[in-house]
Image (cartoon, helix red, strand yellow):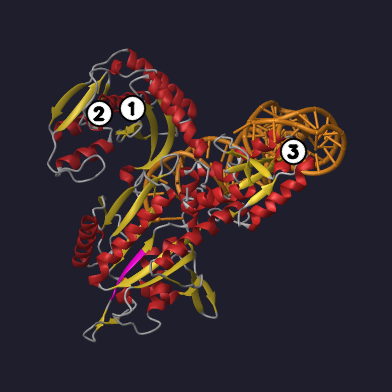
Amino acid sequence: SDQPVVKYEDSQLYRIRHSAAHVMAQAVSELFEPGEAKIAIGPPIDQGFYYDFDLPRTLTPEDLKAIEKRMRQIIAQKFPFEKKVVSAEEAKAMFPDQPYKIELIEGLEAGGLDEYGQPLDETPEISFYTHDSFTDLCRGPHVEHTGKINPSAIKLMSVAGAYWRGDENNTQLQRIYGTAWEKPAELKAYLRMLEEAKKRDHRKLGKELDIYTFDEEVGPGLPLWLPNGGVIIEELEQLAKKIERESGYQQVRTPHLTKEVLFQRSGHLPYYAESMYPPMDMEGTRYYIKPMNCPMHHKIFSARPRSYRDLPVRLAEYGTCYRYEKSGELFGLMRVRSMQMNDAHIYCSEAQFEEEFMAVIDLYLKYFKIFNIEKYVMRLSTHAKDGLGKKYVDNERLWLKTEEMVRQAMDNGGVPYVEVPDEAAFYGPKIDVQVWSAIGKEFTLATNQVDFSVPEKFDLVFKNSQGEDETPLCIHRAPLSTHERMIGFLIEHYGGAFPLWIAPVQAVIVPIADRHLAYAEGVAEKLKAAGLRVNVDARGDRMNAKIRDAQKMKIPYMLVVGDQEAENGTIAPRLRSGERLDALSVDALLERMAAEIENYA
RNA sequence: GCCACCGUAGCUCAAUGGUAGAGCAAUCGCUUCGUAAGCGAUAGGUUAUGGGUUCGAUUCCCAUCGGUGGCUCCA
């Protein structure tokens, strides 16, 4: 643990992966006539590397096998990696058949754009790395020779489409993903980890645990919540509403439909129309299904005159929204088209901003403690100057001001965050909570957004203490995300083993033989009367089978009742950990379960 | 939306250019059992949908729908 921390970019693993990418590019190029394969970029990434190609035909899985085989041959020959620094002119002359390389060189020449088209601090030197017959424009670093790549610790994973420079208006290239490690055992461990992650995937567990389903005739991205999912939703809403009540929120309800004019006023239409279901025409008026609740809440704020004495006004709603996410963007419960948001809008004065904003951050932390969520990053998402007037409201002064307000609030509160430009909402900066799905995709779970723009468009005002009209700031917040994403996340977070308070079925009673059924039903009635979610497994199967099924459904308590229990008025609990407790009276069990629920354990 | 791959019973999977089979689940019997699968029987499929090639298609081709891995985009 006292080992010096080597930055990934400086590590041997990074060099290995970077070198493997070059070796792969050589192997791919050799599949085609000279100059036919256009090579783009091929960097190391978190778990491996990729390389992007523009090829005369699409690559097949068989190609991948052949490429991998050829890579091992190249590795075996221990070709040294040799670096050469050249001028831009020389560099361009080296790549007559490689338009992507020419574009990269011109970027470097013109004042420093890196391979992703992002500006560099200084004009970099232009260098090549050559091994065997393959030369690539490259900053390095590499291993000394190809033999330093362990041929048993590399694997090509998949072919995917990827746009040149990440822009969907550009050519789509073929990207080959590979993974590379120092030792074969590390590759094996990585592949095993991927398998384990798949078992935790909410799409698999959600089906196994009967939480939700999709139906082709309902439509993609439109989940149907099964009874078990219904329970989880109900528990989440009760928690949210209780905490919001304690935190000074008022619950409101708003329609799912609204006239077009509302979204014209809010300014959402130009920014958001692509993600909205198309309008419907009724008696000459266009209506939209709402993709967000904010404009409705603004209308509730302005439904009566407001005084500074009323502020902050906190309006909360589990609002149902529909967004037309493009088909390829859907992902289980994490990215859907129908969703219920743990939404609220806080209207406050500038003086109240910091306290209100940080109260939301405190809410995040409170929920994270309840759910025992530790792996997340808070991200301050700010604007980008070149997006002003396009992606972002065109008022740089207010962007800079509100971003600084958020920084100040977070710093004063001592809450760590990372700052990432060009991730803001169109109306202001925000603190997003970033989490990762089982298979490693990053998602925004919770969000806390400043809005310095839309209240004005809605003519929202309150009378300040001088009797003048003043426009409030608006904070948009969703600490519990949407039901869909939150539950998708929680399924994976708990691996399906939900804590007792939110577990869809909290206990299954396992009668050993039919003669214990009546006693089992009696116990169940008592537990149900105490508000617990309990089933009796009355099937004619042996208890072993009942235990197995309950175990697979990750039910917290399996309550075995046989002759002894029926005689003594007890139950014999087994936990899903496999632990067996001493026989308890029903009252003692109730006490134990109540305490566990109380503690959100 | 784009690129690639995939689609067989509720679930997990098998098989084949000559109209499909297993295990689990379900149903019905038998069994009444002490902590992860008792035994048997029955039922369940226009092989996602629609075209095409063929004497014949579930298998080959095309389109559509849906899913998966990425890209783009996002709570």
Count of picture labels: 3
Q: Which badge, 1 or 2, comes first in the chain's sequence?
A: 1
Q: How far across and down, in percent of the image, does residue A69 sit?
A: 42, 19
Q: Quadrant of the N terminus of chain A?
A: top left
Residue A436 in sight from this viewpoint: yes
Distance in Å between CA atoms under marks 3 and 2: 77 Å
Q: Which badge, 3 or 2, comes first in the chain's sequence?
A: 2
Q: Is residue A529 above or below residue A510?
A: below
Disc 1: which residue: A25
**Span highlighted in magenta in the image:** A472-476
The chain under label 3 reads A
Disc 2: which residue: A136
Q: Secondary structure at mark 3?
A: helix
Q: Is residue A259 above or below residue A510?
A: below
Q: How far across and down, in percent of the image, does residue A293 sit?
A: 43, 68
Q: Which badge, 1 or 3, comes first in the chain's sequence?
A: 1
Identity of the residue drawn at 33% across and 45% down: A166
Residue A327 in sight from this viewpoint: no
Amino acid carrying label 2: it is Asp
Disc 3: which residue: A563
Amino acid carrying label 1: it is Ala
Asked if the stretch drawn in magenta spans residue A425, the answer is: no
Please tell me if label 1 and label 2 are on a single chain: yes
Q: How far across and down, in percent of the image, does residue A5 sit?
A: 22, 30
Identity of the residue drawn at 68% across and 38% down: A546
Q: Secondary structure at mark 2?
A: strand
The chain under label 1 reads A
Amino acid carrying label 3: it is Asp
- Dots 1 and 2: beta carbons under 8 Å? yes
Dot 3: few (<14), some (14–19), or many (≥20) neighbours within 10 Å? some
Is A213 displayed left or right of A62 in the figure? right
Q: Quadrant of residue A459?
A: bottom left
